[in-house]
Amino acid sequence: MKDVQHDSWPRQRPRQRPRQRPLELQEGATAQSLVYATLRHALISGYFRPGEEISLRKVASVLETSVTPVREALRRLEGDGGLEAFGGNRVLRVPILTNAELIDIRDIRVNLEGFAATQAIKRIGPAQMRVINNAFNLMHTAAEIGDVDMYLENNWRFHSLIYRAADRPILMSQIKGLWLRVGPLMRIAVAVAVAVAVAAPMHFDQSMASHCAALQSLRNGDPDALQQAIIHDISEAASDLGKALRNGESQT
Amino acid sequence: MKDVQHDSWPRQRPRQRPRQRPLELQEGATAQSLVYATLRHALISGYFRPGEEISLRKVASVLETSVTPVREALRRLEGDGGLEAFGGNRVLRVPILTNAELIDIRDIRVNLEGFAATQAIKRIGPAQMRVINNAFNLMHTAAEIGDVDMYLENNWRFHSLIYRAADRPILMSQIKGLWLRVGPLMRIAVAVAVAVAVAAPMHFDQSMASHCAALQSLRNGDPDALQQAIIHDISEAASDLGKALRNGESQT
DNA sequence: CCATCAAAAGCGTGATCTCACTTAAATTTC
DNA sequence: GAAATTTAAGTGAGATCACGCTTTTGATGG
């Protein structure tokens, strides 16, 4: 059935080019979704600096695919607010948040994550509690040994594990979208905090106090206390992020 | 290296195709963004039914462009939750919300739009108040004469004008994303409500009562009352949407 | 040595084509 | 005539190329 020669064409067409390569794309997932997931994770983990420019062809080259899936992935990230088009050439880059946007995100996070926490606390069983405890401990030790990557990863794990228990996919995606926006700044803020924490180890205690209070509220099953702890943590973090933002723009 | 004739190929290639046409794409906006805006507006206005399938080539043909920008636009909409990929062929279609998703969206709306209202009320001046009043009146008359399009449009205008006054772009985009998801259902719910309103004109009064209370709170500058009115409206609407959803799935 | 201008490289955008796959229709077969 | 199979049409995914634009670079003139 598959007349490979395409009889509708004259006859001898060289046409040697198409040669589509299936590549290493595994498991039915589209290349576009792989690129999207990769870049999204990189953004949320702060592997890109605010203001860094992302090139279609560079990404396509690194990920060993063509420009088409990359462009779709970048466009999705642009829609998510994780990237922004800049200049007349529409070069895509990591957004540099303004202070107003930071406040905007903070308040949305307070509402959404606070609500998610109250919904989650009813559904957290001993198994989830153990995993959350694990993430908390890892985050704690990461802060002690000054491992920024480990801290960021487990900070996200700690929060997302709680919210995931709420079993609200749409709410979860909204929260993820907000973390995506603050990811690049978060790394800078934490890196600075870690740097000063070497000299003054008590600097992380503010952040740790919030997380500890959240953990305690989880154990007690107190939704209001948990919500307050989450809100406090978000406000603290927003304050640090604001400092990092102002430091960054003074450099630029 | 620019050998336009591609000397690597035999020689006389007709190759008459490139012929890129600038088309009617006006004002520096990319074709992709035009397609996105068009389809997004169509979705939020309920011009597509839940479950309706959207074809790349059909859209490209109707909008007189190629498939590339259309696919990017549809992918963005998929990321927004306005479309979903279905089946092994990843055919894109308008999502059919589950009841859990409806509750999810309702609660997020209560939090986000309630918060937006409290932030907006401090910043609403006489000029905005006049525009909002206008939208309210248009919505009211639309309900009386049974014009579904007019009602939907001004319902969105009424709400968005309030939220826009909060001057929180990110919050606004999140709220828009939620309306995008419920848009297709909203039309069905309103159409049903209009149909029965012809027989029993007092059916719209619930919805109108919420909007009236919101307007009154705006005039009084009472943020708590406004928030309560918004929350009440959202809850009412979610109830109607749930009925429309159950009716729809009984047909399917 | 610096300013100026032209060439080149790089950017995103969009069109076109092939591919793999699914689904609908038509044909054949029992 | 009904059922199974083959065929045709339609789908999204991905690669490649041309285009217009901006930025960088290199050479030339001052």
Image (cartoon, coloured by chain):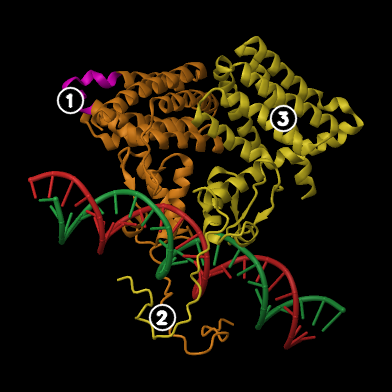
Chain colours: A orange, B yellow, C red, D green
Residue count near mark 2 (Cα–Cα under 10 Å), binned few <14, some 14–19, many ≥20: few
Residue count near mark 1 (Cα–Cα under 10 Å), binned few <14, some 14–19, many ≥20: some
| Mark carried by residue B237 | 3
| Disc 3 to disc 1, C-alpha distance | 54 Å
Q: Which residue is mark 1?
A: A198
Residue B157 percent location from the top left of the image = 66, 30
Q: Which residue is mark 2?
A: A16
**Magenta: predominant secondary structure element?**
helix
Question: With respect to residue A167, does B232 lie above or below?
Answer: above
Residue at screen point 62% across, 26% down: B161
Q: Mark 2: which amino acid?
A: Gln
Disc 2 is placed on an element classified as loop
Is residue A22 visible in the rendered structure shown here? no
Is residue A78 visible in the rendered structure shown here? yes
Q: Is label 3 in contact with label 2 (beta carbons under 8 Å)? A: no
Compare marks 2 and 1 and give the one earlier in the sequence: 2
Q: Mark 3: which amino acid?
A: Ala
The segment highlighted magenta reads: A194-205
Residue C10 percent location from the top left of the image = 30, 56
Determine which quarter of the picture holds residue A190.
Answer: top left
Front tag of 2 and 1: 2
Disc 3 is placed on an element classified as helix
Viewport quadrant of the C terminus of chain A: top left
